[in-house]
Image (tube, rainbow, N blue to C red):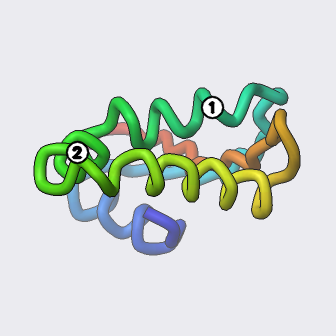
Amino acid sequence: MHDPAELQEWMSNAGFTHIEVKHVALRSGPHDRQDSVNAFFRKHRLGKELEAKDGSAFEPTAQKFEEEIAKRFGGDTPIFDLSALLTAGVKA
């Protein structure tokens, strides 16, 4: 969900009043990019499916994933921008 107005409408349609939607933005701490590869590919269902269907493609894809993380987010210890819509309301 990326649209605060739509989220507010959903809350209203669900019977909430006094709805507040706030955008919260944070940055992650630096971490080993291998952790991201493990979480989002090696141990993720996507990686497991690829390994089951074409085992020879698994390692090259994991390596490419790691390279792209470094390119996009920087070096060996990338930092990610994180954000969320914090929503509160009173159930009528």
Task: Decide: few, some or many residues near mark 2? Use Cα within 10 Å; few <14, some 14-19, many ≥20.
Answer: some
**Residue furthest toward the right?**
75
Q: In this view, does 75 lie above or below 38?
A: below
Q: On the picture, is 46 further left or further right than 1?
A: left
User: What residue is at 86 percent from the left and 51 percent from the top?
Assistant: 74
User: What residue is at 69 percent from the left and 36 percent from the top?
Assistant: 33
Q: On the picture, is 23 further left or further right than 30?
A: left
Going by the numbered disc 2, the residue's amino acid type is Glu
x and y percent of residue 36 in the render?
Answer: 58, 36
Q: Is residue 38 above or below residue 64?
A: above
x and y percent of residue 52 in the render?
Answer: 13, 45
Labels in figure, total:
2
User: What residue is at 80 percent from the left and 41 percent from the top?
Assistant: 78
Q: Name the residue nearer the viewer: 62 or 81.
A: 62
Going by the numbered disc 1, the residue's amino acid type is Gln
3D distance between C-alphas at marks 2 and 1: 18 Å
- Write down the residue under mark 1: 34
Q: Residue 51 carries which label?
A: 2
Which element carries disc 2, helix, strand or loop? helix
Q: Name the residue nearer the viewer: 44 or 29.
A: 44
Q: Which mark is residue 52?
A: none
Which element carries disc 1, helix, strand or loop? helix
Q: Is residue 19 above or below residue 92?
A: below
Task: Decide: few, some or many residues near mark 1? Use Cα within 10 Å; few <14, some 14-19, many ≥20.
Answer: some
In which quadrant will I find the C terminus?
top left
